[in-house]
Image: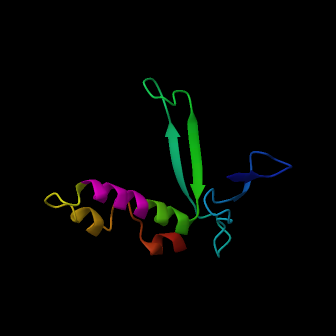
């Protein structure tokens, strides 16, 4: 959940994790969170609904692991089913080196 400034509602002052309720503000003062978003359209039983959930780092990876395990349960007895659990990059779409952040 985004917390906005009372003075300027366009300024986000904090983001609270929608799972555990903790602030996502990191040690350096920046906000560190993941977002889960859904926008349902034509043909969906949730047509017209839009969702956005904010997750702290710990809760994000708990949910990622839960999704990965749920997918694995459906294929665990098939050839190569265990590869889903071994995939450390499950869901990863990019990676930046830590040195880029310290400029």
Up/down of 92 relative to 48, above or below: below
Provide residue 69's location: percent of width, then percent of height.
35, 61
Q: Quadrant of residue 79?
A: bottom left
Provide residue 13's location: percent of width, then percent of height.
74, 57
Left or right of 65, for residue 32: right
Identify the residue at horizontal 29%, vertical 66% (top origin).
85
Q: What colouring does the structure picture have?
A: rainbow
Identify the residue at horizontal 78%, vertical 45% (top origin).
9
Identify the residue at horizontal 66%, vertical 67% (top origin).
25
Left or right of 1, for residue 101: left
Identify the residue at horizontal 52%, vertical 31% (top origin).
46
Left or right of 85, for residue 64: right
Chief SS of the magenta region: helix
Which residue, as the protein is rendered here, is positioned at the far top? 42
Asked whether the viewer can see residue 103, the reply is no
Up/down of 69 relative to 50, above or below: below
Q: How many marks?
A: 0
Provide residue 103's location: percent of width, then percent of height.
53, 72
Asked whether the viewer can see residue 88, the reply is yes
The magenta stretch is 65-74
Which residue, as the protein is rendered here, is positioned at the far left? 79
Q: Which of 76 and 24 lies nearest the eye of the viewer?
A: 76
Q: Which of 59 and 99 lies nearest the eye of the viewer?
A: 59
Q: Quadrant of residue 86?
A: bottom left
Q: Which of 64 and 97 lies nearest the eye of the viewer?
A: 64
Provide residue 56's location: percent of width, then percent of height.
58, 64
């Amino acid at each position: 959940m985004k917390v906005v400034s009372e003075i300027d509602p366009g300024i986000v002052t904090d983001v609270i994790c929608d799972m555990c309720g903790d602030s996502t503000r990191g040690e350096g003062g920046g906000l560190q969170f993941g977002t889960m978003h859904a926008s349902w359209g034509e043909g969906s039983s949730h047509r017209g609904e839009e969702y956005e959930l904010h997750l702290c780092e710990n809760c994000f990876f708990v949910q990622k692991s839960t999704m990965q395990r749920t997918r694995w349960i459906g294929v665990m007895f098939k050839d190569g089913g265990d590869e889903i659990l071994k995939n450390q990059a499950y869901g990863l779409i990019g990676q930046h080196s830590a040195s880029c952040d310290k400029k």
